[in-house]
Image (cartoon, rainbow, N blue to C red):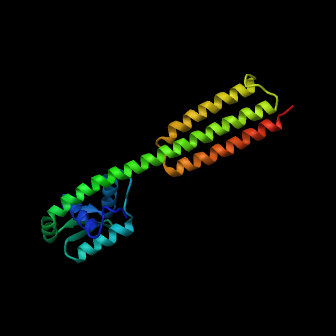
Amino acid sequence: MSAVFRHGALRLYLLKLLDEQPRHGYEVISLLEDRFLGLYAPSAGTVYPRLSRLEADGLVEHEESEGRKTYRLTDAGREELRRNNEALRDLEQDIAQSVSALARDVSSEVRASVRELREELKAAARDVRREARAAGRRASSDGLSGLHIELERLRRDVMQAARTATLEAREAAKTSIGRAREEIVTALRDHEP
């Protein structure tokens, strides 16, 4: 779990979210994910037991409708928030700082992945040119010229997509680029005169 939610902090923040309005557990999870700009979301295994504990402590209560529990703050829960108002303000500042730090980390990872993808694409283009020369073909020939244009188009598309892709998507792209490079080199070798 994020370091922002040190001991007792998630409990306090759940009370704050329920003070705003009654909520389902899934809605609480979604709100936390939104507040962290999608960079952190607690699991159901983290949130639901804490909601149950808050209920056992008399700070929240729930109403069940259509199989879903809607949690709401009790008077004791509001009093708990009032007593911890300063801690809640500090927590809000910690969350803002944590979101900034997470965003910087993700940005750094994306830049590194984009650099790696760029290198993979350059290597693929070099391999294609080398194999074309070895096969006695020139980049100006119709087939190879079209291939070069397609590689350049692929490079631009991949670079654009990599800027917004998830880590898993970037890794999948690197694997696909490697396979495509191997297939191109094999195809050029198979068509040597």
> Image point 15% across, 62% down: which residue?
85
Q: Position of residue 150 (x, y in %)?
A: 64, 31
In the drawing, does residue 11 fall left or right of residue 183? left
Where the N terminus falls, by quadrant? Answer: bottom left
User: Taking 144 as reference, is 91 above or below it?
Assistant: below
> Image point 72% across, 43% down: which residue?
182
In the drawing, does residue 110 fall left or right of residue 44? right
Taking the view exactly as shown, the residue that stands out farthest to the bottom is 56
Quadrant of residue 64 within the rendered picture: bottom left
Where the C terminus falls, by quadrant? Answer: top right
Q: Please state the total of marks drawn on the protein image.
A: 0
User: Taking 62 as reference, is 167 above or below it?
Assistant: above
Q: Position of residue 174 (x, y in %)?
A: 60, 46
Q: Is residue 21 visible?
A: no
Taking the view exactly as shown, the residue that stands out farthest to the right is 193
Q: Is residue 146 visible?
A: yes
Q: Position of residue 181 (x, y in %)?
A: 69, 41
Instruction: Work out whether residue 55 or residue 32 is closer to the camera in this orientation and state it.
Output: 32
> Image point 38% across, 49% down: which residue?
103
Instruction: Work out whether residue 32 or residue 193 is closer to the camera in this orientation and state it.
Output: 193
> Image point 28% across, 52% down: which residue?
96
Instruction: Work out whether residue 82 or residue 17 is closer to the camera in this orientation and state it.
Output: 82
Q: Position of residue 29 (x, y in %)?
A: 34, 60
User: Taking 107 as reference, is 134 above or below it?
Assistant: above
